Image (cartoon, grey):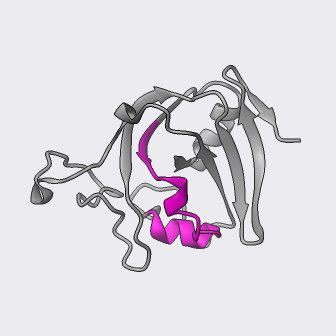
Amino acid sequence: MQKVIPPRLLVPYLQGKRTIISGYVYRVQDCMRLTTPRLLYEALDLGFEGSQLTASVPELYLMRWYARDTDHYSVPYGPHMGGDWNDSPPFAGNGFTSSREHVVPQFHTMPMPIPAGAEIYHVRDDGERLFGIYDGLSWRPAS
């Protein structure tokens, strides 16, 4: 699974002041073709009201982890799809982001601890690089 880390939360994560994952998340395999900050911005509906991100953002940070307990994740269906979810964007209500160019299934997780082995990736136009690894207690710089 993966989640875009809002810029205001990167330092709290790295300093151990934030130790949970919550909100909208995506399967890594569904995002493999989203290789630049702009593509991620467009495909994952990151321009919602109140977002700190813009389409011209030069870099993003992604947290990735293995989903070992699928009970933590639900597909957010709105009433028009037979569900009971009602939320503000990036919620689309149909189990996918609202992008017309990129089909990306959307999942939601209630607050859960960051699993040991989670990784943070730094994504720029020229590619991505491993930035840090969570050992279960703290973030370690990637070597």
Q: Is residue 15 above or below residue 126?
A: above
On the rendered structure, is 52 left or right of 36?
left
What quarter of the picture does the C terminus occupy? top right
Image height of 131 relative to 95, above or below? above
Q: Nearer the viewer, residue 84 or 86?
A: 84
Residue 77, horizontal then vertical, whole percent: 21, 52
Residue name at image x 56 percent, y 72 percent: 39
> Which quadrant of the structure image shows residue 95?
bottom left
Q: Is 125 situated left or right of 67 in this image?
A: right
Instruction: Give percent across and percent down for residue 133.
Output: 73, 36
Foreground: 1 or 39? 1
Q: Residue at x 44, y 74 (%)?
A: 102
In the rendered image, residue 39 lying in the magenta stretch gets the answer yes
Q: Quadrant of residue 119?
A: top right
Q: Which residues are magenta?
A: 22-44
Residue 117 drawn above or below residue 55: above
Residue farthest right in this picture: 143
* Residue 7, image x, y percentages: 61, 49
Write the residue at 58% across / 69% down: 34
Of residues 32 and 89, the one nearer the viewer is 32
Q: Quadrant of residue 84?
A: top left
Q: Position of residue 29 (x, y in %)?
A: 53, 59
Farthest bottom residue in view: 101
Q: Is residue 131 magenta?
A: no
Residue displayed at 75% across by 67% down: 127
